[in-house]
């Protein structure tokens, strides 16, 4: 027994000696040293405490308890400030966004009628059921439907349109608790570089959020009727077919524009999109709801021909403001070229050449109309024309557009 014990002790001593030698070699070769407690703590990630069920308490290691959080609040805590802002804006506005579908009867092959469908977006602006969208979304539609956030579909009646700003107002009959109006912002305070968000229905995917920045301001965009929409907001948010008519939002969730168009060779997002500024829409909104159209000041000039020197008046509206003021349209010159034969030709020298409105130079039809429409029906404006080679001002009392 003693010999056995001695042998065991010798064996243990041998193992200890071998372990000691191995440790010494490790110290010399690797420069190992014990980690201070602080360094160990810095390398070990803190334990993640799983969220408790709502209304329950979570036990802490020291026995203390803290109130539990709902899963939604816990998820928000994991987000950075920008993500949190995106989530909050979407939560507050997405129920205001409407999915618009249209149907139109068109002539197909062999003269047969076919049904053409389209989709777009819109947003609720009041508890009476008024919805804003683009004019081109509902243009020519025989049937318009609006689907609200809860999936309920409603027939939508077109209340008013303004093709010059690509704006239309619809009316849906829905319970007030299903209508969540947006908050309109101030597009005059928009700055290049600021964050923006867009919510719409691209490709029919309802209430889709995309983000970006304001890329530029004061762009111009040609509307369906040929007029130029001024002050357009350019963004890099992903806008695709179906987004038209949806709201463009700032970081506070206020509507600063209405998404209306993209530039793309394939008809899909290429990082250049445009929105009509909300201030331009707000100025005409009341008229669209009350009158169904925008009543603008009218010069009563029916046709002009654009030249490098100005706008040659070809025709004026009979009994209209321009005719009453004495604006001269082009006249037909009649020449006798033989017995019983006459030749008719236009005489450019007989027509007034419009060059300015209130002494502001105008070079295109759009500029002429824009300057005139800055005034109200009944106002008198000075139209500068070149007549018989000399400039002169002609006062014109503006009428009302049809």
Image (spheres, helix red, strand yellow):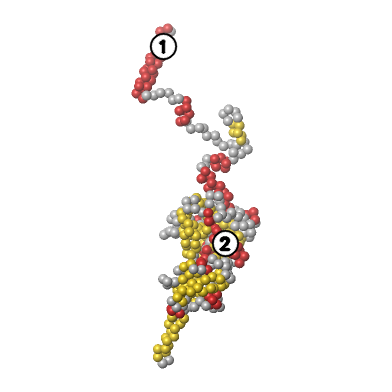
The CA span between labels 2 and 1 is: 100 Å
Q: Residue at x 57, y 49 (%)?
A: 91
> Can you say whether 34 is above or below 316 in the image?
above
> Where the N terminus falls, by quadrant?
top left
Q: Position of residue 294 (x, y in %)?
A: 57, 66
Secondary structure at badge 1 equals: helix
Which dot marks residue 209?
Answer: none
| Furthest residue in direction top, as rendered | 2
Front position among marks 2 and 1: 2
Does residue 338 show up? yes
| Mark 2 lies on residue | 283
Q: Residue at x 43, y 76 (%)?
A: 389
Q: Residues within 10 Å of mark 2 (few under 14, many from 20)?
A: few
| Furthest residue in direction bottom, as rendered | 339
Q: Residue at x 46, y 68 (%)?
A: 361
Q: Residues within 10 Å of mark 1 (few under 14, many from 20)?
A: few
Q: Residue at x 61, y 67 (%)?
A: 291
| Mark 1 lies on residue | 9
Q: Are marks 2 and 1 in contact (CB under 8 Å)?
A: no
Occupied quadrant, residue 9: top left
Q: Position of residue 183 (x, y in %)?
A: 58, 54
Q: Position of residue 396 (x, y in %)?
A: 54, 73
Decide if residue 325 is on the left or right side of residue 19. right
From the viewer's side, name the closer residue of 286 and 4: 286
Does residue 366 show up? no
């Amino acid at each position: 027994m003693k010999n056995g014990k001695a042998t065991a002790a010798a064996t243990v001593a041998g193992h200890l000696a071998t372990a000691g030698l191995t440790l010494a070699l490790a110290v010399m070769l690797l420069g190992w040293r014990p980690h201070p407690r602080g360094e160990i703590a810095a390398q070990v990630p803190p334990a993640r405490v799983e969220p408790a069920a709502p209304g329950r308490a979570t036990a802490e290691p020291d026995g203390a308890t803290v109130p539990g959080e709902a899963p939604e609040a816990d998820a928000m805590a994991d987000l950075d400030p920008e993500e949190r802002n995106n989530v909050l804006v979407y939560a507050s506005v997405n129920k205001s966004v409407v999915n618009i579908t249209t149907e139109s009867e068109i002539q197909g092959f062999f003269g047969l009628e076919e049904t053409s469908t389209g989709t777009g977006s819109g947003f609720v602006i009041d508890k009476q059921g008024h919805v804003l969208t683009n004019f081109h979304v509902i243009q020519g539609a025989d049937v318009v439907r609006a689907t609200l956030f809860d999936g309920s579909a409603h027939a939508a009646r077109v209340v008013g349109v303004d093709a010059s700003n690509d704006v239309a107002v619809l009316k849906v009959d829905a319970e007030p608790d299903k209508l969540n109006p947006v908050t309109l912002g101030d597009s005059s305070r928009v700055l290049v570089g600021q964050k923006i968000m867009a919510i719409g229905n691209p490709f029919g995917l309802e209430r889709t959020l995309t983000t970006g920045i304001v890329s530029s301001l004061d762009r111009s965009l040609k509307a369906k009727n040929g007029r130029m929409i001024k002050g357009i907001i350019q963004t890099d948010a992903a806008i695709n077919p179906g987004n038209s008519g949806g709201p463009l939002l700032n970081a506070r969730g206020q509507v600063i524009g209405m998404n209306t168009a993209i530039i793309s060779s394939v008809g899909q997002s290429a990082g250049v999109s445009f929105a009509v500024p909300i201030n331009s829409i707000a100025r005409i909104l009341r008229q669209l709801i009350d009158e169904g159209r925008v009543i603008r000041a009218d010069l009563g000039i029916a046709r002009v021909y654009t030249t490098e020197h100005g706008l040659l008046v070809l025709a004026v509206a009979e009994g209209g403001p321009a005719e009453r003021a004495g604006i001269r349209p082009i006249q037909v010159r009649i020449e006798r070229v033989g017995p019983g034969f006459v030749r008719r030709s236009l005489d450019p020298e007989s027509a007034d050449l419009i060059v300015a409105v209130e002494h502001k130079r105008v070079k295109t039809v759009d500029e002429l109309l824009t300057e005139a429409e800055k005034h109200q029906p009944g106002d008198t404006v000075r139209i500068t024309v070149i007549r018989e080679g000399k400039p002169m001002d002609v006062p014109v009392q503006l009428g009302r557009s049809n």
